[in-house]
Image (cartoon, helix red, strand yellow):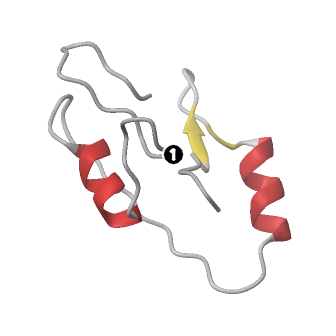
Amino acid sequence: MARPLQLITCEADGTFTVGDEASKVLRAHKGPVGVVSVCGRARQGKSFILNQIAGTAASGGSGFKVAASHRPCTK
């Protein structure tokens, strides 16, 4: 897989769903899968650390977006 992929989404009503794209990727993948979860307050470097772990760059790359702003880049 060449980019991060959100596997599970928490809906407004508190339920969790697996996205269609994530489901397709998981069904087609052969071999082990590593799942990493990071949680924390806004603007604390969660996307940055995930980009470091995945070896991707946010600027022009395939990683999670990061910015020097107070507005969130990811959901």
34, above or below 50, in the image? below
Residue type, numbered disc 1? Ser
Quadrant in the picture for residue 71: top left
Q: Which residue is drawn at 21% across and 42% down?
A: 40
Q: Is residue 54 left or right of residue 68?
A: right
Q: Which residue is drawn at 37% across and 23% down?
A: 73
Q: Nearer the viewer, residue 40 or 3?
A: 3
Q: Which of 53 and 22 is in front in this view?
A: 53
- Where residue 72 appears, as percent x and y from the top left, is 32, 20
Q: Which residue is drawn at 54% across and 21% down?
A: 12
- Where residue 32 appears, as percent x and y from the top left, is 63, 85
At mark 1, the secondary structure is loop
- Where residue 65 appears, as percent x and y from the top left, is 39, 33
Mark 1 — residue?
Answer: 62
CA neighbours of label 1 inside 10 A, class few (<14), some (14 to 19), many (20+): some
Q: Residue at x 44, y 46 (%)?
A: 63
